[in-house]
């Protein structure tokens, strides 16, 4: 039997459809916040995970970006093998870092780990992106008031495919992506709020 790219995408999409949504989403997806609509135009994948926390935006972001348990580092190792099979490059494995709120860059064009800041407004929104040869990925966090001292945080992933490898790559990692981003959001929601 000859396996084509289309067959592979259908198979991966079918497996993801069968197990991915119910198993890996810890909260129902929320509508895309208005401030992100320009970044989402033409996106091939959009997902929104929503959590509540008493943290400030910078506290939430520092905890979000510092989250890297051992199982996540192991997934990065598996990813390194997979991207080589697709003919893509990976520049080493991300190392765990402990960021502080004051370490979070807010100026557009500033580096933020392997991302670049595209848009930021204190206590409202932070948008970063990374471009690879196969896709453009955008990570955004939008904070809005909740009830009392709690705030609602929308953690948004936007993906734009650049070539045939984009959907192949992303459909294979998509269930793990939901695990990783879900874990990051839950961890960040536990960040201590202002003293």
Image: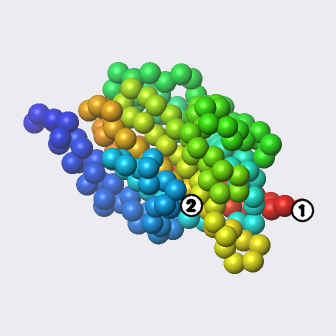
* Residue 179 rendering spot, x and y as whole percentages: 51, 53
Q: Position of residue 18 (x, y in %)?
A: 31, 61
Q: Using the image, determine if residue 81 lies above or below residue 24.
A: above
Estimate how packed mark 1 is, as few (under 14), some (14 to 19) or many (20 or more) residues with alpha carbons within 10 Å: few
* First of labels 1, 2 by sequence position: 2
Residue at the image point whose x is 89% and y is 62% from the top? 195
Horizontal and vertical percent position of residue 43? 36, 47
Task: Tell me if residue 61 can be seen.
Answer: yes
Q: Nearer the viewer, residue 137 or 118?
A: 118
User: What label does residue 195 carry, if any?
Assistant: 1
* Vertical placement of residue 53 versus 178, above or below: below
SS for callout 1: loop
What SS does tag 2 mark?
A: strand
Q: Residue at x 63, y 46 (%)?
A: 120
Residue 154 numbered mark, or none = 2
Q: Is residue 57 left or right of residue 181?
A: right
């Amino acid at each position: 039997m000859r396996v084509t790219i289309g067959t592979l995408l259908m198979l991966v999409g079918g497996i993801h459809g069968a197990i991915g949504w119910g198993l890996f989403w810890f909260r129902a997806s929320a509508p895309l916040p208005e401030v992100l609509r320009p970044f989402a135009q033409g996106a091939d994948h959009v997902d929104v995970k929503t959590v509540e926390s008493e943290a400030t935006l910078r506290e939430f972001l520092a905890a979000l970006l510092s989250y890297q348990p051992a199982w996540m580092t192991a997934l990065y190792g598996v990813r390194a093998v997979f991207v080589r099979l697709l003919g893509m490059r990976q520049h080493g494995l991300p190392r765990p870092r402990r960021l502080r709120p004051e370490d979070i860059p807010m100026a557009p064009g500033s580096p933020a780990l392997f991302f670049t800041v595209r848009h930021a407004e204190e206590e409202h929104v932070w948008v970063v992106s990374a471009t690879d040869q196969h896709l453009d990925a955008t990570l955004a966090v939008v904070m809005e008031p909740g009830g009392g001292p709690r705030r609602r945080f929308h953690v948004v992933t936007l993906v734009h495919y650049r070539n045939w490898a984009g959907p192949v790559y992303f459909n294979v990692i998509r269930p793990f992506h939901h695990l990783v981003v879900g874990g990051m959001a839950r961890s960040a929601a536990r960040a201590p709020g202002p003293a």
